[in-house]
Image (cartoon, rainbow, N blue to C red):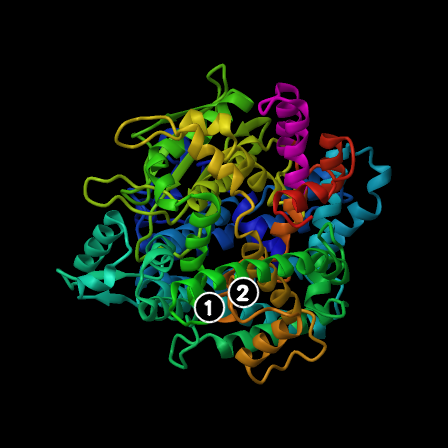
């Protein structure tokens, strides 16, 4: 279903003009059935209500089905113009509505939207299968594919033919009728299970746990802004006069880093790593068992040894074995470094006289002590220079220096939540590029983490370019009292990361929907991760890192400490990430996917790899949303695969002696613009002039 999800949710967003539909007078009150009169024809969020979604989805399915029937009924010999092109541009209303609905369910959901999602999800899954398993449609597409080299097609046309044909093959078009029926059942059940997994994680993260403190002594070690934020949260949680800490990282991590009460650190961290693992109605273990079995069945139905082989065949790595070899190259040096970090922290704990053996919930606390001891650097020293507004100026500064683009705040653009801000993005000459939403802070209706999505991707209709509408969604520290939102440096790099994804979507410019921006999963994190490199460069820091009270530019001494500590804790960070990547791969390469005990499977899998008990995987199974309800199943490894590319790409700028080298910037923008037009590695090597080298990544992380 991966390709159909892309077709529905990423590539066919409506430009605002509705197609022919069956409507009565009441239907025209539905904003999805009218031309958008908003600036740049963005979704009219002020007018959209939950009751509009289901009728619009159903009408979208009807329209899309009619468009497919029209392609099938054509009597001319199938060719690009009468088969591939109309298929590529079909389903716009459905995609428009699905995109808005899916994005709101992730960033601004409520009980009604969640209920709708449970009804809508199987409808979309069935509709997707109805198309990919339509024999008459596949015969026409296969005919064009079989004759593609004799039709005089351009390179872009050849690629879109091959991509669409491959979508059908991977969607089951070549299976027997019996196996297609099995595939339909598997896809439907997977869609329901993934949705339930996601809802459980959302509830477990945002609603089902609070660490409420009523003794001020238990706040010892915490900074005033963290304490004030906890007091504000307590009022929201109906326990005024106390202090409330949540499982959202802006609340949790400062507590783990600085709170002196070890028992409370354990309680908070246990609340985090036990999400979805309490044996109650939000427990995800049985859901995981079913998902793993169904995915294995799907991989084997498609003719592969298992699900990982099916997924990775489309990626740059091509096989699970290649991924495993790659991960092991990093695992060994990272684990060695993490053990050294642990020994250094244990020495501090021993000197403190606490007579403790460091556990997983102690790592952040003693890591901060170690950072202070080794580098004379405290996160609290940095945060005053990284107000949210200053970091936002920083990402805009880098984009302007590299590409000449500008960002204009537009208060007339509808937004889906009062906290969201909207920008018009322009070229240096003032030409409109697209719209960018930014959504910064946690709330009950928003899932955890950070991501970049689109409400409309770039496309062409009747020779006219339709510009993109992009959204960055994050969960950053909130303002507290008179103190603005002050970001940790990890949050700073996260903002640069998501901004890189946004630039990718804003810059893409391809003639066909199916191939616009379509890159292998292990390439997609390159545009985001490469942007992180600029965040810590001294020249860039001086441009945006200013004290929120005095406007003082970050001092050279503090920059020097930050640069010197750049490899700090990299053993831990790399190992916890790799552990999750290995766990993902183990779930999806099982020869016998029947798992009796999820916790035991997870523990034994990682113990065999040598994971030390003081480090948990970045995501334990029961809240591993990337792989059980997101698009990264059998693919969580892609972040570090792309890290090889991003470190190598940034090395080109460093080697040139100019962080904003205009020639390199132009070449990298071309990479973003034309992504999807060719194989991922060929696109990259055209930019770099050679294959990527792993050495810059190893050096950056101190693993060489």
Pointer 1 residue:
358
Residue positioned 50% across, 35% down in the render: 536
> Of discs 1 and 2, which sits in the foreground?
1
Q: Is residue 525 left or right of residue 259?
A: right
Relative to the observer, which residue lies in front, 675 or 23?
675
Q: Residue furthest bottom?
A: 596
Badge 2 density bin: few <14, some 14–19, many ≥20, Cα 10 Å: many
Q: Is residue 160 visible?
A: yes
| Secondary structure found at label 2 | loop
Q: Which residue is mark 2?
A: 617
> Considering the numbered disc 1 on the image, is that residue within a helix, a strand or a loop?
loop
Q: For the magenta stretch, what is the residue range? A: 645-673
Q: Earlier in the sequence, mark 1 or mark 2?
A: 1
**Residue lying furthest top:** 429
State the quadrant of the N terminus: bottom right
Rendered position, 205 above or below 690? below
Q: Which residue is nearer to you in this view: 392 or 229? A: 229
Question: Quick check: 408 above or below 206?
Answer: above
Rendered location of residue 655, percent (x, y): 68, 27
Residue at 76% from the left image edge and 38% from the top image edge: 682
Outermost left residue: 241
Rendered residue at 58%/50% (across/down) = 6
Q: Position of residue 22 (x, y in %)?
A: 43, 50
Q: Residues within 10 Å of mark 1 (few under 14, many from 20)?
A: some
Q: Magenta span: helix, strand or loop, mainly? A: helix
Residue 647 belongs to the span the image colors magenta = yes
Front one among 371 and 73: 371
On residue 511, the disc is none
Instruction: Answer above or below: position of 425 versus 147.
Output: above
């Amino acid at each position: 279903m991966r390709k159909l999800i892309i077709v529905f949710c990423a590539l066919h967003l409506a430009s605002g003009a509705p197609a022919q539909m069956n409507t009565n007078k009441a239907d025209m009150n539905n904003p999805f059935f009218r031309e958008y009169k908003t600036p740049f024809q963005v979704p009219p969020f002020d007018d959209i209500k939950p009751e509009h979604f289901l009728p619009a989805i159903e009408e979208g399915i009807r329209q899309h089905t009619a468009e497919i029937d029209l392609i099938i009924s054509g009597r001319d010999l199938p060719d690009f113009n009468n088969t591939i092109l109309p298929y590529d541009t079909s389903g716009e209303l459905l995609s428009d509505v699905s995109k808005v609905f899916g994005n709101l369910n992730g960033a601004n959901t409520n009980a009604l939207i969640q209920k709708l999602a449970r009804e809508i999800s199987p409808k979309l899954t069935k509709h997707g299968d109805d198309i990919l398993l339509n024999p008459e449609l596949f015969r026409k597409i296969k005919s064009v594919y079989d004759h593609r080299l004799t039709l005089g097609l351009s390179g872009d046309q050849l690629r879109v033919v091959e991509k669409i044909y491959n979508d059908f093959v991977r969607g089951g078009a070549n299976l027997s009728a019996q196996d297609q029926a099995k595939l339909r059942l598997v896809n439907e059940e997977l869609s329901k299970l993934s949705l339930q997994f996601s809802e459980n994680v959302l509830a477990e993260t945002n609603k089902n746990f609070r660490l409420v403190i009523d003794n001020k002594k238990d706040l010892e070690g915490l900074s005033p802004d963290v304490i004030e934020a906890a007091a504000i949260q307590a009022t929201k949680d109906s326990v005024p006069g106390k202090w409330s800490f949540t499982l959202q990282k802006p609340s949790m991590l400062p507590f783990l880093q600085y709170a002196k009460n070890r028992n409370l650190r354990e309680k908070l961290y246990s609340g985090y790593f036990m999400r979805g693992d309490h044996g109650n109605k939000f427990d995800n273990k049985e859901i995981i068992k079913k998902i793993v079995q169904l995915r294995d069945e799907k991989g084997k139905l498609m003719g592969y040894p298992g699900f990982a082989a099916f997924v990775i065949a489309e990626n740059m790595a091509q096989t699970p074995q290649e991924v495993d070899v790659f991960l092991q190259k990093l695992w060994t040096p990272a684990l060695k470094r993490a053990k050294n970090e642990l020994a250094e922290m244990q020495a501090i704990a021993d000197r403190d006289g606490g007579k403790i053996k460091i556990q997983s919930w102690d790592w952040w606390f003693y890591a901060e002590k170690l950072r202070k001891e080794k580098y004379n650097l405290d996160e609290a020293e940095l945060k005053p220079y990284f107000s949210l507004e200053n970091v936002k100026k920083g990402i805009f500064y880098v984009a302007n220096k590299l590409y000449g683009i500008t960002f204009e705040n537009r208060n007339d653009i509808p937004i889906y939540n009062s906290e969201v801000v909207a920008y018009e993005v322009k070229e240096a000459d003032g030409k409109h590029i697209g719209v960018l939403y930014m959504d910064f802070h946690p709330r009950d209706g928003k899932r955890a983490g950070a991501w970049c999505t689109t409400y409309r991707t770039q496309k062409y209709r009747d020779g006219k370019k339709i510009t993109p509408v992009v959204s960055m969604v994050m969960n950053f520290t909130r303002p507290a009292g008179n103190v603005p939102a002050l970001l940790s440096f990890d949050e700073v790099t996260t903002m640069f990361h998501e901004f890189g994804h946004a630039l990718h979507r804003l810059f893409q410019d391809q003639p066909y929907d199916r191939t616009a921006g379509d890159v292998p999963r292990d390439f997609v994190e390159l545009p985001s991760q490469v942007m992180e490199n600029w965040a810590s460069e001294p020249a860039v820091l001086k441009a945006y890192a200013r004290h929120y009270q005095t406007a003082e530019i970050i001092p050279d001494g503090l920059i020097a400490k930050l640069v010197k500590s750049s490899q700090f804790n990299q053993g831990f960070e790399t190992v916890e990430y790799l552990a999750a990547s290995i766990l993902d791969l183990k779930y999806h390469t099982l020869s016998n996917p029947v798992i009796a005990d999820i916790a035991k499977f997870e523990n034994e899998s990682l113990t065999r790899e040598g994971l030390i008990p003081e480090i948990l995987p970045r995501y334990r199974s029961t809240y591993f949303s990337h792989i059980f309800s997101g698009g990264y199943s059998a693919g969580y490894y892609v972040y570090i695969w792309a890290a090889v590319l991003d470190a190598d790409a940034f090395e080109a700028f460093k080697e040139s002696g100019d962080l904003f080298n205009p020639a390199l910037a132009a070449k990298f923008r071309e990479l973003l613009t034309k992504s999807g037009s060719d194989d991922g590695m060929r696109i990259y090597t055209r930019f770099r002039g050679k294959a990527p080298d792993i050495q810059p990544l190893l050096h950056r992380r101190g693993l060489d």
